[in-house]
Amino acid sequence: DFRRAERAEKERLEQEKREQNERLDAALSDGVRVVVDLSYGATMNLKEQRSLARQLGRCWGANRRAPAPVALHLASMQRCPAPCLPQDGDHKRWKVRLLDEDLEHHFSPSDLVFLSPDADEALTCVDESKVYVIGGLVDVSVQKRSSLTRARELGATAVRLPLREHVADVANRRQPLTLPAVLEMLLHVNATGDWLPPPPPPTPPHTSPHLPT
């Protein structure tokens, strides 16, 4: 009857949530580490900061639903302007690691791998011993080489996502992607070992937010 079906559906959803939380806990314990670098927050205007907050929410949603989530970190929380973060402190309830200091205070530069479309070397696989860094910069004017410059300053590695190798219909394969697009590509390869299917197409310049270069 209706009540029995309703009860069964409720139990199914509760079981699904338990399994989801178990996957997230396991990822935080020993999964692939991915850091969103929020040290760029003060360089953005209010509109860009609010766009970053929305993209962070989408990143959390993608990781929460992923069959093989990553250990998601948010770095430079202490100097990240409030509009860059979700309203009402939603991020404090996420299963992510919140790091007050800049990422170099938590990880060795030799372990850091910055994702930058301006890097020459392509990322070929996900290495669990490394820490993958996504620049948390939303800038409609396209600041060139931001992530690449930061990686070089720290003496860290910088690589690009292999768009030119796997995405045949992308006109500009060095065009930055949104944070969720980058994370979803990493989540897919983490779950399957394959770079396909490709992420959503890069956002066109001057029209919508994107990741730093």
Image (spheres, rainbow, N blue to C red):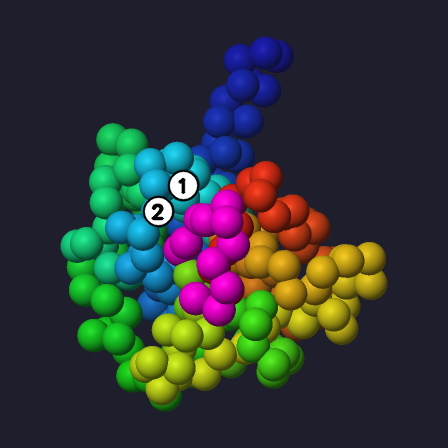
Q: Quadrant of the N terminus?
A: top right
- For label 1, the crowd category at 10 Å Cα-Cα, with few meaning under 14, some 14 to 19 and many 20 or more, is many
- Which residue sits at x=26%, y=75%? 104
Height in image: 181 above or below 88? below
Q: Is residue 171 left or right of residue 63?
A: right
Estimate the x, y position of residue 11 in percent, counting from the top left.
48, 32
Q: Are marks 2 and 1 in contact (CB under 8 Å)?
A: yes
Estimate the x, y position of residue 17 in percent, counting from the top left.
45, 41
Q: Quadrant of residue 6?
A: top right
- Which residue sits at x=58%, y=20%? 5
* Number of callouts: 2
Dominant SS in magenta: loop
- For label 2, the crowd category at 10 Å Cα-Cα, with few meaning under 14, some 14 to 19 and many 20 or more, is some
Estimate the x, y position of residue 152 in percent, counting from the top left.
39, 82
Query: In front here: 7 or 198?
Result: 198
- Which residue sits at x=32%, y=81%? 154
Height in image: 125 above or below 207? below
Residue that carries the numbered disc 1 in the rendered image: 48
Real-space Cα distance between discs 2 and 1? 6 Å
Is 137 inside the magenta-drawn segment?
yes
Query: In front here: 205 or 4?
Result: 205
Question: What amino acid type should be assigned to the residue bearing mark 1?
Answer: Glu
Give the magenta range.
Answer: 136-146
Query: In front here: 180 or 160?
Result: 160
Question: What amino acid type should be assigned to the residue bearing mark 2?
Answer: Met
Mark 1, secondary structure of its residue: helix
Is 77 inside the magenta-drawn segment?
no
What label does residue 186 carry, if any?
Answer: none
Does residue 9 appear in this view? yes
Residue that carries the numbered disc 2 in the rendered image: 44
- Which residue sits at x=39%, y=35%? 47
